[in-house]
Image (cartoon, grey):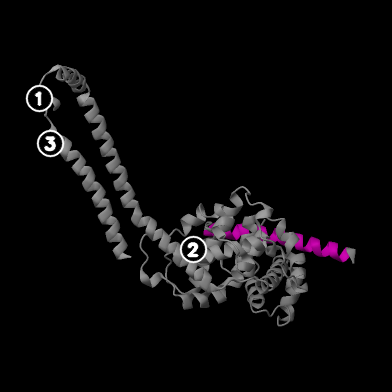
Amino acid sequence: MSLPMPLESILPSLFAGEAFRAAAIPAELPPETLMGNEAFAGFYSRSARPLWAYLARVSADPTLADDLMQESFVRFLCAARPDDGEVAARRYLFRIATNLLRDHWRRPRQASIEEIPEEFFATVSTAAQSDSRIVLGPALARLTLRDRQLLWLAYAEGYSHHEIAEVTGLASASIRLLLFRARRRIAVLLRDQDTQGGNRQ
Amino acid sequence: MTLGPCPHEKEIAALLAGGQWPQAAPADLRAHAATCRSCAELALVTTAFRSARTTAAAAAPLVSPGILWWRAQLRRRNAAIERVTRPILGAQIFALLICFVVAVGFSVSHAAQGIGWISDLTQLIRLPSIDMAKLWPSSTQGSALWVLVPLAAMLALLGGVAVYLASSEER
């Protein structure tokens, strides 16, 4: 899928704020920190889908997920990151995406529906996607953005508390409690949904 | 509210991560999960999220990585250009400020002389022959300053240009 217009014109408000500071272009980039086109293609093929899933499910907006995913990768490429292997690089990518998402939610809504190209509305939905959305979607929608992020990183991505702290910028000590509460909340919501579904049948 | 995890949680989490829950789980562990609230929640939530991840990842619309790579190159290049043009902007502002100070200083110091010069000019019209010396301001004190200050402004401007050219060559 290609964007019919530059991303900067669709989401001008994204190019400032916390995410920009987190992945600001440094004055001098050492050559070893720059990723080549082929290396990036490999990394992209392994990381893009999980990242899009994270952004789409946490934001509940596939169009926004498209834009934020692209922006995350561009910033990832521009940033001087520690060369600690692919796992660390992916964590760094998720961190950029998390900050972008947070910045987006903090800003007032500016985009008009008329500015969004029509092709973005023509999304293909399979039965499996619909089922999954029905099961998790309503429960996730009733949680805060932070809870959604924590739950996704812990139970969909399988990150440890330390890694979640690194991605979200929260204190490592508080992750355990926050995650415990969020898990309890969503478990109750999922059980309620299940009970209501069973009653209807 | 207690935060102590159930000792079986790690075992169940490992089975969930490997996609072996509940089929490959021992019967006693499954029986435990049915009665333990914490383990039941872990299994329920992990299963829901893993399933959602699989379906969402399959639906991800991906752009070509080459496009993103080139966009990153372009952004990095623009950032580099912005960085090297910053000193020249500073030099321009500095030169402008010096010129302004010189202009103000010149106007203030020559305001009084200017009035005298106008009266000299009126006298000059009445004179039969023109004396060129009278056209020149009577006081030439501080003339070195009027040469040095614009020179400094010019040097600042040229310095900015030199920095810009040096930075461009580095890139």
Q: Position of residue A33 (x, y in %)?
A: 40, 70
Residue B116 versus residue B165 in the image, above or below = above
- Residue B6 in which image quadrant: bottom right
Disc number placed over residue B131 in the picture, else none: 1
* Earlier residue among tags 3 and 1: 1
Viewer-nearest residue: A79 or A120: A120
Which residue is under mark 3?
A: B144
- To the question of a shared chain for discs 2 and 3, the answer is no
Q: Position of residue B103 (x, y in %)?
A: 25, 33
Residue B154 versus residue A87 in the image, above or below = above
Residue drawn at 63 percent across, 60 percent down: A64
Q: Determine the secondary structure under disc 1.
A: loop
Please check the rendered image and state whether residue B139 is part of the magenta-colored stretch, yes or no: no
- The subunit carrying tag 2 is A
Q: Position of residue A49 (x, y in %)?
A: 61, 72
Range covered by the magenta-colored residues: A172-199
Q: Horizontally, is B91 left or right of B126 in the view? A: right
Q: Amino acid at mark 3?
A: Ala
Viewer-nearest residue: A168 or B84: B84
Q: Residues within 10 Å of mark 1 (few under 14, many from 20)?
A: few
Q: Is residue B3 visible?
A: no
- For the N terminus of chain B, the quadrant is bottom right
Which residue is under mark 2?
A: A75
Q: Is residue A141 visible?
A: yes
The residue at the far front in this view is: B128
